[in-house]
């Protein structure tokens, strides 16, 4: 099988610290274009995407239905990495807070909150924030940068790793998950990073992606116009608006 380079419209996202391109955060169409760069047929993208998004495999060698030389090439040039854990705190009620270290050394927080009938994962969208909401500690930190779609999704995949929610080989994805709800309520203002947040949530909602219903996804915002309207029209997820008053 040829892995020679061919011209394509694929625009690679930023590489990680080892020079690899993250496949987490690519849509199926983008993954097809990424494979076309190396002369690989587009039909290989769907099983690869399923191994990543639906099985949660953290390495290419275990993607058994992909040709061996393709797996070798993917391992050399691409990544399905997770963030590393800088700190983990667990509460008696089952709440878990992770301080996650990204590939460039920046840190974000992700929090899992279990309840009787659901489990909510609070996901960050930025490192730091430009806003100064009085109820939020992130507002005391300067904005460093936006997170890429891959870094937003990596937080969800990390939580599924820890909670062991990926189906085993030969099994279907169970509907009985601990992480049932996603809330964009971590560090940052999601609508100031709309393009990356939108892309990540579309992959979350895609049946070929993480397969999380839009009814179980909430985006929390301080009220950024006109992105609030754009979010409703394009994503149609739940919206939570933080209201401030002088008292």
Image (cartoon, rainbow, N blue to C red):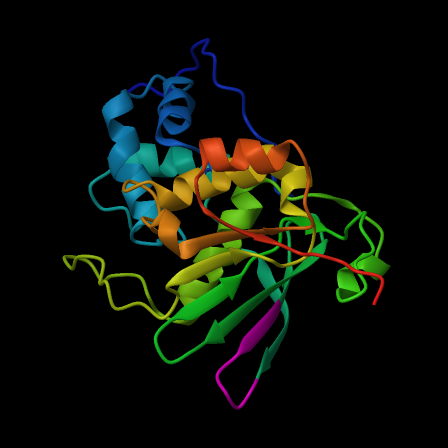
Report the side of 181 relative to 108 (left or right).
left
Camera-nearest residue between 78 and 1: 78
Per the rendered image, the range of residues in magenta is 91-98
Camera-nearest residue between 90 and 61: 90
Inspect the magenta stretch and tell me whether residue 150 lies in it: no
Residue extending farthest to the left is 170
Q: Can residue 169 be seen in this view?
A: yes
Residue extending farthest to the bottom is 92
Q: Would you place residue 48 above or below residue 61 in this image?
A: above
Q: Which residue is drawn at 35% across and 16% down?
A: 39
Q: How many marks do you count on the picture?
A: 0
Report the side of 183 relative to 41 (left or right).
right
Q: Is the magenta stretch mostly helix, strand or loop?
A: loop
Q: Which residue is drawn at 68% across and 45% down?
A: 223
Camera-nearest residue between 89 and 32: 89
x then y, percent, for residue 154: 50, 52
Q: Would you place residue 165 above or below residue 205 in this image?
A: below
Inspect the magenta stretch and tell me whether residue 97 lies in it: yes
Q: Would you place residue 246 above or below residue 36 in this image?
A: below
x then y, percent, for residue 70: 32, 32
x then y, percent, for residue 155: 52, 56
Q: Which residue is drawn at 32% across and 39% down?
A: 49
Q: Would you place residue 82 above or below residue 137 in this image?
A: above
Report the side of 138 relative to 91 (left or right).
right
Camera-nearest residue between 242 and 92: 242
For the N terminus, give its image quadrant.
top left
């Amino acid at each position: 099988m040829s892995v020679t380079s061919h011209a394509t419209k694929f625009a690679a996202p930023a590489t990680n610290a080892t020079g690899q391109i993250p496949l987490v955060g690519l849509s199926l169409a983008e993954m097809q274009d990424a494979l076309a760069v190396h002369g690989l047929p587009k039909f290989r993208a769907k099983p690869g995407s399923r191994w990543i998004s639906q099985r949660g495999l953290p390495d290419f060698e275990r993607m058994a239905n992909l040709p061996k030389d393709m797996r070798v090439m993917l391992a050399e040039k691409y990544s399905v990495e997770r963030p590393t854990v800088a700190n983990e705190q667990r509460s008696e009620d089952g709440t878990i807070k992770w301080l996650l270290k990204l590939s460039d050394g920046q840190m974000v927080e992700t929090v899992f909150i279990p309840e009787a009938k659901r489990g909510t994962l609070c996901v960050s969208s930025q490192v730091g924030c430009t806003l100064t909401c009085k109820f939020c500690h992130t507002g005391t930190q300067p904005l460093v940068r936006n997170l890429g779609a891959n870094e937003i999704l990596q937080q969800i995949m990390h939580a599924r790793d820890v909670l062991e929610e990926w189906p085993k080989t030969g099994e279907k994805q169970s509907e009985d998950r601990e992480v049932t709800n996603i809330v964009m309520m971590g560090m940052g203002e999601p609508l100031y990073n709309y393009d990356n947040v939108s892309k990540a949530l579309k992959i979350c909602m895609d049946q070929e992606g993480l397969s999380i219903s839009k009814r179980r996804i909430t985006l929390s915002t301080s009220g950024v116009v006109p992105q609030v309207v754009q979010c409703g029209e394009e994503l149609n997820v739940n919206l939570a608006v933080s209201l401030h008053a002088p008292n």
